[in-house]
Image (cartoon, rainbow, N blue to C red):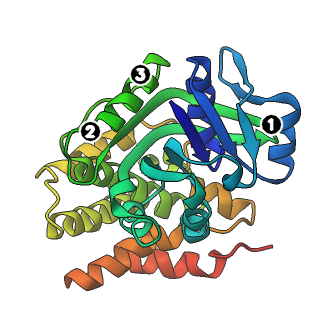
Amino acid sequence: MKIATMATGGIGGFLAVKLAEQGQELVMIARGRHLDAIRSNGLVLETASDKTVCRPALATDDPAEAGPVDAIIFGVKGDDLPSAAKAINPMVGSDTVVIPFLNGVEASDRLCEFIPEKNVANGVAYVSTTISEPGVIKQTGAFNRFIFGERDNSDSERLSELRDAITSAGVEAPATDDIKLAVWQKFLLFSAMSGVTAAARCRFKEIRDIEPLGELFRGVVAETAALARANGIAIADDAEIGIWEQALLMPDEMRASTAIDLENGRPLEVEWVTGAVKRLSAVAGLDAPINNTIYALLSPYRHGSG
């Protein structure tokens, strides 16, 4: 397959290296020093046990150089979605599939505003990665799981082929018969992890050990689960309990990317996480006071703190 990563950050870079190892043709869209490093030295994936170097078929900041591809791994920040979606148009052919792996639950719908719906799938990623330096993706933690499907949950040859390629690369890519449910299931955990670790400037250890923080976390989960159910998502009746049980097993130092971005003065994806719960709850006629408060606390830092 000819596969493009837009952009080649933590998620796109991880999959790019894994897929290139299996002989897939990779096009990496990147920019700045990260692009320069990929062109000079290849893209490096560092894990706890080894280091892998991938040299793509093409590394560029201009998607038009690539032409149409079979699949686009779309992993950008929520605020960057409009500009990135417009930029990938030269790579979208008649049967190209674009799989968004973004935080939140709105990315697939938002993509349909910029490219034909028939080219858009939906997806959710479970992997902890970061660009540790230009040209280097570092994986922190051993887990990696990518769930994706067509927006209508239909079977498709194009996604089956991509799923087979990812699985052959040693990465989990299980099939799903309800991709919206899969996306919302992660969102229940991530919205709470994002909002609480950022607003309280804390780690999971404090969430478990300090009861008011635990209550805050469970409150965010409850509001998000109520929103999911109001939108017809088949969230289990005991989902809130299951999310808290997951939280109890998280590493002590675990924080959401939102908290890390806040600490480093970078823009926050708050509009597409806590802000989404606030906004969508209002549309559904639901109260979300905890998410509303966290959104207000983080709003001054949405565009970074310099």
Which of discs 2 and 1 lies nearer the camera? The answer is 2
Q: Which mark is residue 88?
A: none
Amino acid at the residue labelled 1: Ile
Look at mark 1 in the image and give the residue it sits on: 38
State which quadrant residue 261 falls in: bottom right
**10 Å crowding of disc 1: few (<14), some (14-19), many (20+):** many
Which of discs 2 and 3 lies nearer the camera? The answer is 2
Residue 172 located left or right of residue 304? left
Residue 155 located left or right of residue 5? left
Look at mark 3 in the image and give the residue it sits on: 167
**Element on which disc 2 rests:** loop
Look at mark 2 in the image and give the residue it sits on: 156
Q: Is residue 253 above or below residue 190?
A: above
Q: In the image, what residue occupies the spot 50% across and 30% down?
A: 1
- Residue 297 percent location from the top left of the image: 54, 78
Residue 71 located left or right of residue 24? left
Residue 71 at least partly seen: yes
